[in-house]
Amino acid sequence: MSTVLLHFEEDLSSATRIAQAANLSMGLIERHRFPDGELKLRLPASLPERSIILRSLDHPNEKLIEIMLAGATARTLGARHLTLVAPYLAYMRQDIAFAPGETVSQNIIGKFLAGLFDKLITVDPHLHRSPTLRQAVPVAQAIALSGAAPLSDLIAQRRPSALLVGPDEESSQWIATAANRHHLEHGVCRKARLGDNAVSIDLNGLNPAGKAVVLLDDIASTGHTLAQAAKRLLAAGAASVDVAVTHALFVNDALQVIQQAGVGKIWSTDCIEHPTNAVSVAPLIAEALSL
Ligand code: R5P
């Protein structure tokens, strides 16, 4: 039996893109929700030795239960080597206890996933203080891909003379990769987070006057980081500001917040399905599946 890519119904489009790129067969995980909220899943009755579960972990709380149920069941149905493809990996940002008593979610979720899977493939995991993905999720094989290259290709096509800007110093890793790929001018701002919905941004010496700026970041959640950065750049004379992100979380009114700040185009990868998706990471995932 050839390797199977197991997916949930709502992920049919991204599963199809990955399965086609990696030449895999597909298997549906059916889901039933009982009136009390509990879930029952049903996988194909027999699975090949090498099986893959696709679940991007935006809105993660229920999905973590799903992959726990699906992963454990897959083992009983014949899967000996189990891969999780989670293009967006949740709970990576809380990587230390900022105050006594706080959960270090990265450790807890990382160990939980490592108990279920042999291999993990994800894209731009938010590893702030952990140097490697395997340190955060101690599976036998952990592969962290990046949306920087496909986003850079798109930016080079749409805004060939863009000034590529990261909203904070953490984004310098993606900015450098994306900018060097197409020899784009680049720089990063400085950010201070003041609360869940508030950040302050300093241009950190950047001069965007007259430039077509593209802001590039790993995640857009509330949108305030990108919105504040866009406001500063436009106030400093940027000719235009567009936005490119790997993970289109865009919670609540995030899109509106970003647009109201004066942003033109908003592009994202398909790590999380969203109307802003403009490039696919399926070819990268297919390549990582063959490793
Ligand atoms: C944080 O360091 C990340 O790279 C993003 O900048 C951040 O998660 C974006 O969050 P928000 O959209 O809520 O400002």
Image (spheres, helix red, strand yellow):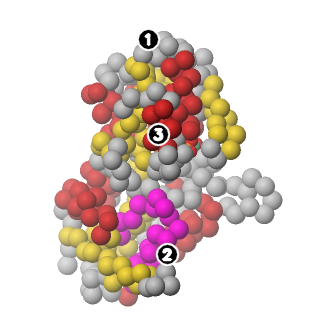
Q: Position of residue 270 (x, y in %)?
A: 34, 50
Height in image: 44 above or below 212? Answer: below
Residue found at x 49% / y 81%? 37
User: Reading the chain from its start, which is encountered first: label 2 or label 3?
Assistant: 2
Circles 2, 3 touching at the beta carbon (< 8 Å) = no
In the displayed orientation, state which residue is furthest to the top: 210
> Badge 2: how crowded within 10 Å, few (<14), some, or many (20+)?
few
Q: Which mark is residue 256?
A: 3
Q: Which residue is mark 1?
A: 210
Please, what is the three-letter code of the amino acid marked with disc 3? Gln
Please, what is the three-letter code of the amino acid marked with disc 2? Ile
Secondary structure state at the residue bearing disc 2? helix
Side of 119 relative to 36 (left or right):
left
Range of the magenta residues? 53-74
As measured in the structure, the alpha-carbon distance from the residue carrying label 2 to the one carrying label 1 is 49 Å
As measured in the structure, the alpha-carbon distance from the residue carrying label 2 to the one carrying label 3 is 31 Å
